[in-house]
Structure formats: C-alpha cells, structure tokens
C-alpha cells in the first residue's frame, strides 16, 4: 500500500484543478492494478484526495450524501492505493488499487458490469457477493 | 468498429442520467480494448453519446470550447469503438476503443502519463508523437 507524507500531499493538491466541476470536484477513475479492469468512476474534493494519499485507502466525495466517503467503510471492500496518476490537464486522477472484495455496491467486481450490445444491456461483470448480506443492518 | 442503429441509440440514451453534472454531462473513461491502459477521461452530453454510437468513433463534449468534439478531428488520432459499457448508476460510461495514434494531445500514449512518486511527477507514459508537428497550422 502506498501512503504519502504531509508535504508530498500539500504539493500534490496544489497541482490539481478542482475548478471545473460544481462543488470543486475532480473525477477519479479507479483501476485494478493487476488485472487493469476499471472498477469505478467517482468524484473527489480536496479533502478526499488528501485522505486517500494520507491513509493509502481510496476516499471519494459522495454527491448524493454530500460527504467524504471512504470506499468500503460499510462493506469492508476497501481499495488499497498502489499508485496515483494525474492526467495532462491536472483535472482528473487515476487510482491504481488493490480491491478488497468487490468494487460495486450491487455485488459485481466492477461498477462497469453491463455492456450495451444488440439493443440491450448484457451483464459482463462477475457477481462476487450478495448486497443484501453485505449491507444488512 | 462497433456502430449502433438509431433505435438502439434512442434506447441507450434514455437509460443515461445526465442530471448530475452542470451542463447535462456524464464522465466518460476511455480504455484501450487490448492493452487495457486507460487513455483519457472526458465528458459527453447526449449529442456526443449519440454521435459516438452512430459513427463508431468516440465523441466528447469540450467544456472549454463549449462544443461537440470528435476525438482526433485535428490530429487524426481517432478512437474506434469496440464496446460501450455503462456503470451501475447509469451516470458514467466506459468506452473500450482502438486508439489510432495516441490519446494525449501532448504526444503521449495516454493522458495519464504522470505518476506521483517521491514528491514529484514521474513520466510513465510513452511519447508517441511531437505535438508541434501534429497540431501545426
């Protein structure tokens, strides 16, 4: 797992351009560092980027709940950071991670588990867990 | 290359939730269908999604120029659609593509060509072309 020092984090967030999306957010794409499968696409504000780099676990900003969100905080399906990559415009991030469990809250290995083909959505992801069991109260 | 019929396209855009980003946009992540490298992250409005599916070439919406944008229209570095994948919330897309030339306008194979490591950005992408030659007037 990859963590970063306070001064590294300060330097990094200075580079990022949060101005382009309402609420000062950047899109973050998360990729399995080994299989290269894309796991999810979410958003981060500065706090989420800082927490990600400080703890070594992916954090995002939930636009529906208006709050910082550690991926896996309920399910245990955390994402350990292997590397952090920035795009040419400094306005989006790629997190290469080791995914514990599965990325999608619907139980699939990836949130991108449906391909559009022949006029219908075809399931191409792998069901890894039962959401009703993992998210039960 | 994968193209879609008018009725398939109508069906598909109905599924998408464009409401979450100002300007009715969704984030689109583009991946090399063979190497699985992530090439870029951009935005699309409904028109861009329609054009992508209709023509078989990736189209995006340029927020800086406020216009529909066919990737590669200037450089020739088009992206041929191999498959279209939708995420669990219907608010982002994954395009698996065959990239002609290189994805990044700075000449690298991917827009995500810099990794944050040891307090600095380290170039991990491969320089494929010279932007001054490709984008010359």
Image (tube, coloured by chain):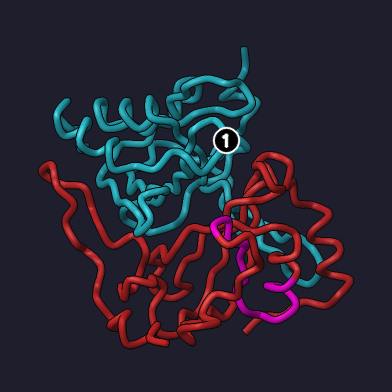
Chain colours: A red, B cyan
Which quadrant: the N terminus of chain B?
Answer: top left
In front of the other: A21 or B79 = A21
Is-magenta flag for residue A62?
A: yes
Task: Determine whether, in the image, residue A14 is placed left or right of residue A125.
Answer: right
Q: In this view, which residue lies farthest toward the front?
A: A137
Q: Residue at x 86, y 64 (%)?
A: A10
Q: Residue at x 58, y 52 (%)?
A: A27
Is-magenta flag for residue A9?
A: no
Callout 1 crowding tier (Cα within 10 Å): few <14, some 14–19, many ≥20:
few
Q: In this view, which residue lies farthest toward the top?
A: B137
Q: Chain of mark 1?
A: B
Secondary structure at numbered mark 1: loop
Residue A111 found in image quarter: bottom left
In front of the other: A94 or B5 = B5
Percent x, y for residue B115?
66, 62
Which quadrant: the C terminus of chain B?
Answer: top right
Q: Which residues are magenta?
A: A51-64
Percent x, y for residue B7?
14, 29
Is the residue B17 above or below the residue A73 in the image?
Answer: above
Percent x, y for residue A118?
10, 44
Instruction: Tally the numbered discs.
Output: 1
Q: Residue at x 50, y 83 (%)?
A: A74
Is the residue A65 above or below the residue A59 in the image?
Answer: above
Task: Determine whether, in the image, residue B15 is placed left or right of residue A122.
Answer: right
Is the residue A72 above or below the residue B119 in the image?
Answer: below
Percent x, y for residue B60?
45, 31
Q: In this view, which residue lies farthest toward the left?
A: A118
In front of the other: B71 or A106 = A106
Q: Which residue is mark 1?
A: B22
Q: Residue at x 64, y 59 (%)?
A: A44
């Amino acid at each position: 797992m990859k963590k970063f020092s306070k001064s590294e984090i300060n330097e990094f967030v200075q580079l990022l351009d949060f101005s382009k999306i309402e609420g000062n957010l950047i899109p973050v794409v998360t990729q399995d560092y080994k299989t290269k499968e894309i796991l999810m696409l979410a958003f981060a504000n500065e706090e989420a980027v800082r927490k990600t780099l400080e703890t070594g676990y992916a954090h995002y900003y939930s636009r529906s709940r208006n709050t910082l969100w550690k991926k896996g905080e309920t399910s245990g399906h955390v994402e350990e950071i292997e590397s952090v990559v920035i795009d040419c415009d400094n306005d989006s991030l790629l997190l290469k991670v080791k995914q514990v469990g599965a990325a999608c809250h619907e139980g699939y290995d990836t949130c991108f588990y449906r391909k559009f083909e022949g006029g219908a959505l075809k399931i191409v992801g792998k069901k890894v867990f039962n959401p009703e069991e993992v998210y039960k109260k």
